[in-house]
Each structure stands twice: as structure tokens, then as C-alpha cells.
């Protein structure tokens, strides 16, 4: 996609207001701020969809966003100052300073407070850090960082500390170890030597037709593994049915507490994922693809950018057609239409539907949207045949799924298993059993939004459509195991606090409902009729899935753990 770089606006000086005064009202454009912002942006296109990338450049360099820099950025992009401010203040990872506010310390330490990290000592860790670090760093809490299998997780700058202890964090701060650590992964040469990209080349060479590819996916039972469960082949066919030009977007913004499988695929198997991306672009004839990856994954982002460059060098990808866009700390952007808004450089506010993204998506074009794991399986389905994928599965279900397992098990991690596996089978066969000293009490089958089930219901197949009758969802396969040492009401409160923090604020049922639910759940005694009435309002009237699913954990306490309800 070719973009024409507009002429960079020049400093216009303070000028005069309507009254002729030399100091007009409003924010003034300062020469030094203009020079600083212009130097940082370099030859970056000054188009609206690049606004969040520009905000990241300023934030990374100055550790904050000052008013003067935001005014200069608005001038560079020819946007109203209000448009820049509303975007910058929407995302949690942008520090917008008040006029007289001092810049933050050089190092920021973020302690994850999601459910698994809280279970494994995040609160105690947080309480000790301020006294240990003193003025050497700023200590903040953060929602899920996608490292639940290595809880508690702490980020020192962009360096994530796994199984964090005060000693590890203190050492990282003292040594200014703030850069992301790149893990070992399968690089381009290793992937190609093992037969990688041969399926893509068959597509490019005409040995596979677009109809063959889409039909194979339809027959394979491969579905959207980000949580929707919609048929992948059918989605590709629908998008292809709308007149072009078409685009593709990849959702790598897995912010659901308990979920980290997409991180696993990008950091370990990036080229198999990218082969699926390129096959998808080819199949629907998308002119460009935007991969939206959460800001908490700096190592995965670096691996992804390097892998894309290798594909361009190998002439498997036309330069400038696959873009990596960096999230800025907003769980709501995992909702596909909010993600599209963010890619366009705006606040991540969900769109009303219809129209759906397949018809009117990114930049108002028909857009194919897929999850990372879904695209990871595309190559294997086409190489091995649709039956290979559909023949996997247990308990009458079809296909493979990757479960992000964390909590009270010996061996947490990303576990690839047959769809329909039960939680008991998952714990015993893939996780080494329960952690020492813990007895299985309950589990979250689908992350924060999937509800909570008791151990007695350990024989339910984990798949789309199997959990709804129990008030739960399979979602993206984030399974958090709870033990007798965990209070389910406290777990539900942790989840509701997460939703209060992450609500985009667009609709009243979600914005006010999450806040009110937290206050009611923090009381010594729960007002069950009021909480149930509030939950029903949120589920019925919220615009998107965030508000609709937020009460699931709370309602699970009433359904399955009444003894833990306050």
C-alpha cells in the first residue's frame, strides 16, 4: 500500500488572536517541541492511522507525553489537538502529563495484578517494592501481561521478569535492564530447511487454487480460535465475496486474563504463523495486512518485525504490504471492531454492528480478521488434508486447540490438545497434576469472561457450545485452575476489577455497571438481588462482549459456589 508523505507543517509562530492580542487563547505551538517531534518522527507518514505509532515514539523516548509535544504532534498530523488528546488519554500505556507535572522516573516497574499473579503472590510483591526501590523507579499495577504461566509477572521497562521476586526486580532496576529479552525461536532459515513456505509457494505458483484452499479449510472444522468459533473457511469465502479492494487484519491483542497462547506461537513458531497470514492474504486477494500486537509483548513484536523483513528479502512478500501495529494497553482492542479503530489511529471504541468487518472493516474496506492460532494451523491443514485436523479431538469434538493453563498446577503453559478434552484430562495428562499441597476446587474454562466451574464438573468437554448451559464459555482456551486455598468470591472480585479498569466507557451499562458491581462486591455482605439485576442489565444492554461477559464470574459464584458468596 503506497502512502504519499504530506509536507511537514512548519512552525507558524504565536500570531495574533481575533482581538489583535499577541497571546491568543488555546495551546501554543512551541518551536523546540516542533523540532523534537519532527526529529523523532523522521520520514514516518503523517497519516491518521500512524498517530498511535507516533505517540509510542514520543513516549518511548521521553517516557511521557507532555502537552507541548502533543500540540506539536497535532500540528504535524494536521489534526485537532482534541483528537490527539482523546487518543493519547484512552490508552493505559501513554503517560499524558499535566502542564506542571514532572516527568516520571527513568524506570517504570509494572506489577501484574491479574488473577493468576494475585494467586501466586503479586500483592505481597507489590507491597514490598516501594520500600525496596525507593526513588529509583516508579511502581505501578498493571492488568494481565500474558505471562500467567510464569506468575507472578513484572515488567521493568520492556523487560518482563518471570516468577518475579524482589531480588530479581531490584537487580533489573539497578542494572537498568529495561529492554525486552528475545527468546530462542525458529528463524527463517531453520523453518525453510524443514520445508516451510512450500505450501505458500504452491499457492503462488498456481498449484493450489483459491477455491481449493477455502474448501479445505471449510472441511477441516478449523474455526476462529480467538474465542468466536466461527468457521475459518466460511469467513474467508464471505470476505472474498465482497468486491475489493480488500484488507486483512490479525488480532494478536490477547488481553484476556489467563491467555498467552498467541505469544507462544509468535515467539516460538513465528514463520508458520506468517505462512498462514500470507496464504490468507493470497486467498482473499487482500492488498495489505495489519498485525495488531499488544504492547505487553515487546519480544514477540521484535521477532515478528524481523521475520517480516526476512520474507521481503526472500521475495515471498511484497515490501510494504504487511504492517505491525503496536497496541497501547487496552483490553477492549481485542474486540475486533475496536482493534480496527485502533489500527486507524483512534480510540479503541467498538463499532455498532451491522455492518460487519467482512463487508465494511478496516478503512471501510472488506476485511478478513483472524486470530494468531487460527492462522498457525492453516499450513498444516493444507499440507495434511482437512481430515488430519478434524480427526483430532476428544469426547465427540473435532480439531486441535491450544489451552493456556495457569494457576494451581505443577506444569502450567501452552498445551496443544484435542478439542473437547476435559479439564481433568488436561490437568493429569498435560500439566503434571495439581501443584503440591493443593486440591482441585474449581476452574475458569475460558479466561476472565468464561465464568467459573466447580471441580465436580470436571468432565465437560472444553469446546465451543459445550459450556453455555452452565453459564460459561470456552473463549480463547484460557484455563485457570483454582484450589481449596482460593476463595472463589475473591477471584470473581479480581475479575470484575479488571473489567472496571478495562471498560472503554462508551456505553453506560458496562461503564457504570462494572464500577457499581465492584463496589457492591467489596461490601462485607453481597446484595444478591441487586447484583443479579445489575448483571442482567449489563448482559442485555452492553454494546460489546466486554460488558456482556463481565458478570459471568460473579454469577458463577451464585450458581456453583454459594458457600463462598459473602
Image (tube, rainbow, N blue to C red):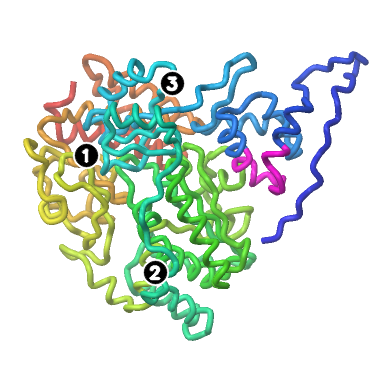
Q: Which residues are magenta?
A: 38-54
Q: Is residue 39 magenta?
A: yes
Task: Check disc 2 and report its element: helix, strand or loop.
Answer: helix
Quote the CA–CA distance across marks 1 and 3.
40 Å
At 47% from the left and 37% from the top, the residue drawn is: 330
Percent x, y of residue 29 = 78, 26
Name the residue beneath numbered marker 1: 452
Mark linked to residue 136: 3
Quick check: marks 1 and 2 in contact, CB under 8 Å? no
Quote the CA–CA distance across marks 1 and 2.
42 Å
Q: Residues within 10 Å of mark 2 (few under 14, many from 20)?
A: few
Nearest to N terminus: mark 2 or mark 3: 3
Q: Is residue 31 above or below residue 146?
A: above
At 44% from the left and 32% from the top, the residue drawn is: 176
Task: Check disc 3 and report its element: helix, strand or loop.
Answer: helix
On screen, residue 68 versus residue 551, left or right, reads right
Magenta stretch, main secondary structure class: helix
Percent x, y of residue 465 = 27, 55
Percent x, y of residue 225 = 35, 57
Name the residue beneath numbered marker 2: 190
Q: Residues within 10 Å of mark 1 (few under 14, many from 20)?
A: many
Examine the image and state in which quarter residue 136 appears.
Answer: top left
Quote the CA–CA distance across marks 2 and 3.
42 Å
Amino acid at each position: 500500500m503506497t502512502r504519499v508523505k504530506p509536507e511537514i507543517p512548519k512552525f507558524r509562530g504565536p500570531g495574533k488572536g481575533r482581538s489583535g492580542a499577541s497571546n491568543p487563547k488555546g495551546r501554543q505551538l512551541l518551536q523546540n517541541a516542533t523540532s523534537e517531534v519532527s526529529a523523532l518522527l523522521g520520514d514516518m507518514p503523517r497519516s491518521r492511522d500512524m498517530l498511535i505509532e507516533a505517540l509510542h515514539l514520543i513516549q518511548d523516548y521521553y517516557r511521557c507525553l507532555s502537552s507541548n509535544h502533543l500540540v506539536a504532534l497535532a500540528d504535524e498530523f494536521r489534526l485537532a489537538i482534541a483528537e490527539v488528546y482523546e487518543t493519547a488519554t484512552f490508552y493505559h500505556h501513554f503517560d499524558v502529563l499535566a502542564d506542571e507535572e514532572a516527568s516520571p522516573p527513568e524506570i517504570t516497574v509494572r506489577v501484574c495484578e491479574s488473577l493468576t499473579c494475585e494467586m501466586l503472590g503479586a500483592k505481597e510483591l507489590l507491597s514490598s517494592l516501594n520500600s525496596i526501590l525507593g526513588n529509583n523507579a516508579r511502581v505501578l499495577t498493571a492488568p494481565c501481561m500474558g505471562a500467567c504461566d510464569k506468575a507472578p509477572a513484572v515488567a521493568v521497562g520492556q523487560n518482563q521478569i518471570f516468577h518475579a521476586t524482589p531480588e530479581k526486580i531490584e537487580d533489573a532496576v539497578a542494572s537498568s535492564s529495561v529492554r525486552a529479552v528475545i527468546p530462542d525461536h525458529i528463524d527463517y532459515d531453520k523453518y525453510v530447511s524443514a520445508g516451510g513456505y512450500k505450501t505458500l509457494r504452491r499457492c503462488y505458483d498456481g498449484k493450489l487454487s483459491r477455491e481449493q484452499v477455502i474448501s479445505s479449510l471449510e472441511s477441516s472444522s478449523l474455526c476462529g480460535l480467538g474465542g468466536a468459533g466461527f468457521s475459518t473457511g466460511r469467513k474467508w469465502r464471505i470476505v472474498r465475496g465482497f468486491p475489493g479492494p480488500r484488507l486483512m487484519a490479525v488480532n494478536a491483542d490477547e488481553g484476556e486474563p489467563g491467555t498467552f497462547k498467541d505469544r507462544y506461537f509468535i515467539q516460538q513458531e513465528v514463520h508458520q504463523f506468517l505462512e498462514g497470514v500470507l496464504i490468507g492474504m493470497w486467498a482473499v486477494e487482500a492488498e495489505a495486512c495489519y498485525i495488531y500486537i499488544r504492547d505487553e509483548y515487546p519480544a514477540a513484536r521484535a521477532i515478528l518485525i524481523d521475520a517480516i523483513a526476512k520474507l521481503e528479502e526472500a521475495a515471498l512478500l511484497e515490501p510494504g504490504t504487511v504492517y505491525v501495529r503496536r497496541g497501547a494497553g487496552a483490553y477492549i482492542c481485542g474486540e475486533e471492531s475496536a482493534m480496527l479503530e485502533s489500527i486507524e489511529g483512534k480510540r479503541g471504541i467498538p463499532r455498532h454492528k451491522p455492518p460487519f468487518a467482512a463487508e465494511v472493516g478496516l478503512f471501510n474496506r472488506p476485511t478478513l480478521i483472524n486470530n494468531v492460532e487460527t492462522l498457525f494451523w492453516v499450513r498444516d491443514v493444507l499440507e495434511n488434508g482437512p481430515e488430519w485436523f478434524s480427526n483430532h479431538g476428544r469426547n465427540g469434538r473435532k480439531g486441535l486447540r491450544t489451552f493456556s493453563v495457569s494457576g494451581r498446577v505443577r506444569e502450567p503453559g501452552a498445551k496443544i490438545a484435542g478439542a473437547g478434552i476435559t479439564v481433568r484430562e488436561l490437568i493429569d495428562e498435560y500439566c503434571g497434576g495439581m501443584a503440591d499441597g493443593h486440591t482441585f476446587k474449581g476452574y475458569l474454562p475460558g479466561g476472565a469472561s468464561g465464568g467459573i466451574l466447580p471441580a465436580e464438573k470436571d468432565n465437560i468437554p472444553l469446546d465451543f457450545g459445550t459450556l453455555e448451559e452452565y453459564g460459561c464459555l470456552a473463549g480463547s482456551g484460557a484455563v485457570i485452575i483454582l484450589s481449596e486455598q482460593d476463595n472463589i468470591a475473591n477471584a470473581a472480585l479480581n475479575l470484575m476489577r479488571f473489567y472496571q479498569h478495562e471498560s472503554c466507557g462508551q456505553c453506560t451499562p458496562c461503564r457504570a455497571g462494572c464500577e457499581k458491581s465492584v463496589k457492591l462486591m467489596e461490601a462485607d455482605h453481597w446484595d444478591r438481588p441487586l447484583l443479579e439485576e445489575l448483571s442482567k442489565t449489563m448482559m442485555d444492554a452492553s454494546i460489546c462482549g466486554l460488558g456482556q461477559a463481565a458478570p459471568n464470574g460473579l454469577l458463577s459464584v451464585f450458581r456453583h459456589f454459594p458457600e463462598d458468596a459473602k
